[in-house]
Image (spheres, rainbow, N blue to C red):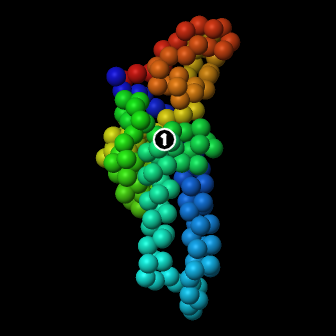
């Protein structure tokens, strides 16, 4: 059984902005500290030039592989899982982010809005989903409930109002 998700365009966008803001702060600090002044700002060369891609590599794929989320996703209550709710592998985390340059912006928004499980191109290639904060309506009292990642993965939740057991959308 595969998990059905919501778009979460705003949450995903804000999480991405937080993550890339963290990366940009590091890059600005690194360039100002270790770069050589040029007419256009600062430049790094040699072994120092490898640091920025290594930090990108360490932050995005490694944190998602180890924790299932980056700091931006943690703040917004999102996680990355396999299409079946399991923990993602390092290869999946790397695949998700190799396509970041294509997926950031309109291409990612179009993909998320138009794929059945709201995946961007990196998610489709890696066979991953972004989950968290999904809303479901109780079948007994019709109260809208925001589910935890565990409830989404479990495929069921108890309504906090009427305590009825409910199943989530499963494809």
Q: Is 102 placed above or below 9 here? A: below
Q: Is residue 167 above or below residue 28?
A: above
Which x, y percent locates residue 168?
Answer: 48, 19
Q: Residue at x 62, y 78 (%)?
A: 33
Residue 32 visible at all = yes
> Residue 18's quadrant in the figure?
bottom right
Q: Is residue 62 above or below residue 1?
A: below
Residue displayed at 40% across by 21% down: 170
- Between 58 and 94, the one lying in front of the other is 58
**Horizontal and vertical percent for residue 16?**
54, 53
- Answer few, some or many: residues within 10 Å of disc 1's Cα (few below 14, many 20 plus, some between 14 and 19): many
User: What kind of element bears circle 1?
Assistant: loop
Q: Quadrant of the C terminus?
A: top left
Residue 122 shows up from this direction: no
Is 124 left or right of 49, judged from the image as shown?
left
Quarter of the image where one finds residue 26: bottom right
Q: Along the line of sight, which residue is nearer the eye, 155 or 150? A: 150
Q: Can you give x and y, in whole percent of width and height, for residue 167 in the image?
A: 48, 14
Of 19 and 169, the residue lying toward us: 19
Please identify the quadrant where the N terminus is shown.
Answer: top left
Tell me: 105 left or right of 25: left
**Residue at image mark 1:** 68
| Residue furthest bottom in the image | 39
Up-down relation of residue 109 to residue 167 (above or below): below
Q: Position of residue 169 (x, y in %)?
A: 44, 21
- Left or right position of 111 against 6: left
């Amino acid at each position: 059984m595969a998990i059905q998700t919501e778009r979460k365009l705003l949450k995903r966008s804000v999480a991405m902005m937080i993550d890339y803001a963290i990366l940009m702060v590091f890059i600005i600090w690194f360039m100002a500290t270790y770069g050589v002044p040029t007419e256009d700002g600062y430049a790094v060369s040699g072994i120092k030039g490898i640091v920025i891609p290594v930090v990108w590599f360490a932050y995005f794929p490694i944190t998602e592989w180890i924790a299932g989320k980056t700091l931006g996703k943690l703040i917004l209550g999102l996680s990355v899982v396999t299409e079946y709710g399991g923990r993602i592998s390092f290869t999946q985390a790397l695949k998700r982010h190799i396509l970041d340059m294509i997926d950031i912006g309109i291409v990612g928004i179009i993909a998320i809005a138009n794929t059945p499980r709201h995946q961007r191109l990196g998610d489709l290639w890696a066979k991953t989903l972004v989950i968290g904060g999904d809303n479901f309506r109780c079948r007994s009292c019709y109260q809208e409930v925001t589910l935890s990642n565990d409830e989404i993965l479990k495929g069921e939740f108890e309504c906090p109002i009427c305590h009825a057991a409910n199943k989530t959308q499963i494809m």
